[in-house]
Amino acid sequence: MRGRVRHKAALAALESLSREPAPASCALCGRPLGSRVEWHHVVPKSEGGRETVPLHPICHRAIHASASNADLARLYPTLDQLPEREDIARFLGWIADKPPDFHAPTRRKR
């Protein structure tokens, strides 16, 4: 391997070593995780964050559809504060009875 490919492979190997095994539930909605798990930076990487948590893909998209990276870093530095947002609270009520691998298109706020 050369250059960029080797660097990407090294980063992927390092990242896989630094992550703990995925827990059984989503950090946002609390439902059991399905076959697909996405890792969300609680404080976005662009804002200096390093901590990641496992989420359903639909939960991950709902977070980013409702708040910008700057807002996530400034107003919601922990996931505990995020359900206080009206749009996230509505999403959590709607998603609560869906199966773990449920997927639907995510709409951005207008």
Image (cartoon, grey):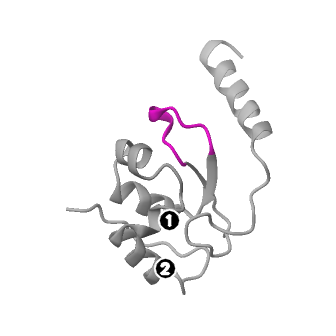
In this view, 54 is above or below 72: below
Which secondary structure dominates the residues rendered in magenta?
loop
Front in this rendered view, residue 80 or 52: 80
Residue farthest to the bottom, as pictured: 97
Q: Position of residue 98 (x, y in %)?
A: 54, 83
- Describe residue 84's horizontal placement relative to residue 19 as left or right: left
Mark 1, secondary structure of its residue: helix
Front in this rendered view, residue 97 or 8: 97
* Mark nearer the N terminus (1 vs 2): 1
Q: Quadrant of the C terminus?
A: bottom left
Front in this rendered view, residue 2 or 109: 109
Q: Quadrant of the N terminus?
A: top right
Residue farthest to the left, as pictured: 110
- Describe residue 76's horizontal placement relative to residue 98 as left or right: left
Disc 1: CA contacts within 10 A as few (<14), some (14-19) or many (>=20)? many
At x 68% / y 66%, what residue is drawn?
A: 35
In this view, 2 is above or below 77: above
Question: Of the residues shown, which amino acid type is indicated by label 2?
Answer: Ile
Magenta stretch?
42-51
At x 45% / y 33%, what residue is drawn?
A: 46
Q: Position of residue 100 (x, y in %)?
A: 62, 76
Q: Position of residue 78 (x, y in %)?
A: 53, 53
At x 42% / y 49%, what residue is drawn?
A: 72
Q: Quadrant of residue 74?
A: top left
In this view, 106 is above or below 11: below
In this view, 15 is above or below 83: above
Question: Of the residues shown, which amino acid type is indicated by label 1?
Answer: Cys
Residue marked by disc 2: 95
Residue marked by disc 1: 59
Q: Position of residue 44 (x, y in %)?
A: 48, 41
Marks 1,2: beta carbons within 8 A = yes
